[in-house]
Amino acid sequence: MGTAVVVSANTKQLLERAVAKLDVLGHRIAAAEIRETQERKDAQARADAAAYLTSREHLLDVQAVQRECQRRADDALQPWGERAPAPIAGESVDAYRLRLVNIVQERLPENDEYRHLRLSGLDRSVFKLGSPDALRGPRYSRA
C-alpha cells in the first residue's frame, strides 16, 4: 500500500535546519508586523495632535489659558489701579505670560528681589499658572 521513504541522516539534518530557519524568519516577520503596527499608531497619533493644533478646540483652549493669565495679572496689578492688557492676536501662551510677568515686575519696588530678575533666560515652565511669584497675588500696596 504505502511506500517507505528512506531518508539519509544528511537529508534529515538539512530539513531540520530549513525548519529552524523558517521559524526564525517567521519570528522576524511577526516582529516586523508588530513594529509596523506601532509605527502606524504613532503616525496617527502625531497626525491627530497636528490636527488638534489647528482646530477650533485648541484655539479655545489657548484663549481660556490666556484669560486665566489675564485674570491673575489683573489681581496682581489691582494695588496699582491697573488692569492687565489683553493678549495680542497670535501671541503664544508663554509669550503672553512673560509679557504679563514683565509688566508686574516693572511695578515692584526697586529693592524687591524679583524687580531685576532676568526672565528671558529662564525655562518657560516657570511661567505655568501658579508658578511666578509676581502673579500669586498682590504683595505690595501702591507706592
Image (cartoon, grey):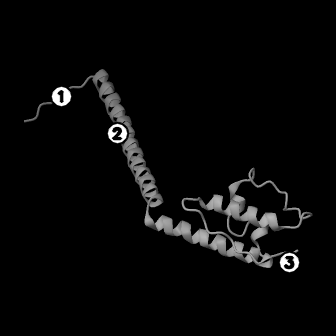
From the viewer's side, name the closer residue of 35 and 27.
35
Q: Position of residue 66 (x, y in %)?
A: 60, 68
Which tag is nearer the camera, tag 3 or tag 2? 3
Which quadrant does the N terminus fall into? top left
User: Of the residues tagged 1 and 3, which is closer to the observer?
Assistant: 3
Q: Which numbered circle lies on residue 5?
A: 1
Give the Cα distance between marks 1 and 3. Answer: 103 Å
Amino acid type indicated by mark 3: Ser
Q: Which residue is mark 3?
A: 141
Measuring from the top left, give residue 25's x and y in whole percent. Answer: 35, 35
Looking at the image, is mark 3 or mark 2 earlier in the sequence?
A: 2
In terms of secondary structure, where does tag 2 sit? Answer: helix
- Counting from the top left corner in percent of width and height, residue 105 is at 79, 64
Is label 3 in contact with label 2 (beta carbons under 8 Å)? no
The amino acid marked with disc number 2 is Gly
Distance of mark 1 from mark 2, alpha carbons?
A: 29 Å
Q: Nearer the viewer, residue 34 or 25?
A: 34
The residue that appears at 55% across and 62% down in the rendered structure is 89
- Which residue type does callout 1 highlight? Val
The label number, if any, that marks residue 90 in the structure image: none
Mark 2 Cα-neighbour bin, 10 Å: few <14, some 14–19, many ≥20: few
Q: Residues within 10 Å of mark 3 (few under 14, many from 20)?
A: few
Q: Earlier in the sequence, mark 1 or mark 2?
A: 1
Task: Kindly report the distance in space between the C-alpha atoms of the residues bearing marks 3 and 2.
Answer: 75 Å
Q: Is label 3 in a helix, a strand or a loop?
A: loop
Which residue is label 2 attached to? 26
Q: Could you tell me if the residues under marks 1 and 3 are in contact, i.e. CB atoms within 8 Å?
A: no
Quadrant showing the C terminus: bottom right
Lower position in the chain sequence, tag 1 or tag 3: 1
